[in-house]
Amino acid sequence: MSEASVPRPSRRRLLLLAPLAAAAAAGAGFYAMLRGLSTGSYDPKGVPSALIGKPVPDFTLPPLEGADLPALSAADLRGGERPVLVNFFASWCVPCVIEHPMLMRLAKQGVPVFGVAYKDKPADALGFLRKHGTPYAKLAADQPGRVAIDWGLYGVPESYLIDRQGIIRWRWAGPLTEDTLTQELLPLLKRTA
Amino acid sequence: MRRVLAALRDAAAPALRAGLGALAAAWLLATPVLAAVSDPAEMLRDPAQEERARVIGRELRCMVCQNQSIEDSDAELARDLRRIVREQVSAGRSNTDIMGYLHDRYGDFVLLRPPVKPETYLLWGTPVIALGLGLAMIVAMRRRRAANPAPQPDLSAAERARLRSIEDGSGT
């Protein structure tokens, strides 16, 4: 305590620098958040799925009327030959339009993509697919949206990667983008294939 | 120029009023009592059951709006979840069962009161840590002040003389 008078000047400098340093750190953090927001790597509303690593929930859904594609049930996702992508979409959902080309590309590359039309009128969903193309090998309709809740879905679009054992490996809430595909989905597909 | 300003003001007034109206509406909506399930078709007929469903619903986060409970939210998904809660309440399932049902599907995030577990120790501990830090700072400051009290500056000879003259009532 006897040196109390000695550190005075440095202490004053600390008092000046500490708030500046705190402000600089906050600024750097904020900048990182903004950058993450624009690149899509940071999503403040993103919520991890509770179902990762768990088997797909039991469900049976009817086919989408008029689509002439087979319906979808949990059995279709268990013990398949290869991992599949399950995509929940709706014709009334704008981001679904944005991500659609990605789904078309995946389908073209031979990735099985199964679709679930969420809370959509069959005619509207059909119109959407007629306009933007059909990437789905199977297509079901969840008009009441109850099966979607079993999947932990909280909005459309949402995509789930199911491995060959029927375990949910990955969930993407929001539109699939070029980056999502190259950075996340395609490497995972390679690993789970 | 003045006419332009007046026109601008006239144009802005309705927008301002609309803004205030929206603000008032937002305030009303933010008041939880008013925003609770208002659609009578959604409510259970048994008031006791309805009350139980509300208690459960207030503990569950609407995943779409995120800072509202499913009881307070107008989101489609919140409505679906309210319906599920009510179905299960009338089927006689316990509160823990119903919360568990949604927790299985939506994870910890759906619980507005997060569970205490290793991942959330920091979350729950932060107030205690902050309080402890504050107390430690106060104690340290008091100790330091007690150890070396502020030095009392001595009066100079001239000041002492002036003080004496004031005390004598003779000087100004």
Image: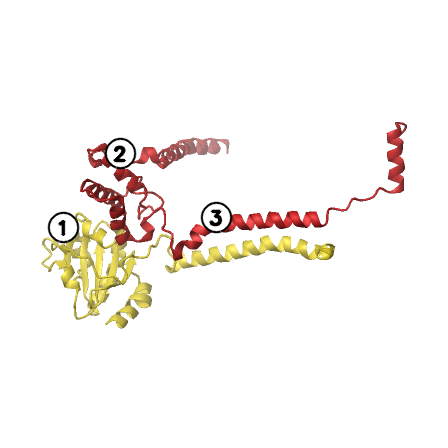
Q: Earlier in the sequence, mark 3 or mark 2?
A: 2
| Colour chain A appears in | yellow
Query: Could you tell me which residue is drawn at 12 percent across and 58 percent down?
Result: A71
Which chain does the numbered disc 1 sit on?
A: A
Q: The residue marked by circle 3 belongs to what chain?
A: B
- Give the image location of residue B118, x and y in percent: 39, 57
Toward the viewer: A166 or A89? A166
Residue at the spot x=35%, y=36% of the render? B32
Relative to B161, does residue B144 appear above or below in the rendering? below
On the image, numbered disc 2 is attached to which residue?
B38
Q: Crowdedness of circle 1 by 10 Å Cα count: few (<14), some, many (20+)?
A: many
Front: mark 3 or 2: 3
Can you see residue A75?
Answer: yes
| Type of amino acid at the residue the image marks with label 3 | Pro
Which colour represents chain B? Answer: red
Q: Name the residue under label 3.
A: B127
The answer to whether marks 3 and 1 mark residues whose Cβ atoms lie closer than 8 Å is no
The reply to the same-chain question for discs 3 and 1 is no
Query: Tag 1, which secondary structure?
Result: helix
> Which disc, if any, is residue A122?
1
Task: Tell me the chain of label 2.
Answer: B
Looking at the rendered structure, the secondary structure element under dot 3 is: helix
User: Label 1 vs label 2: CA separation?
Assistant: 30 Å
Which image quarter holds the N terminus of chain A? Answer: bottom right
**Residue A84 as seen in the image, left or right of residue A31:** left
Residue type at numbered disc 1: Pro
How far separated are the C-alphas under marks 3 and 1?
Answer: 52 Å
Separation (CA) of disc 3 from disc 2: 36 Å
Q: Badge 2: how crowded within 10 Å, few (<14), some, or many (20+)?
A: few
Q: Where is residue B8 in the image (x, y as percent from the top left)?
A: 45, 34
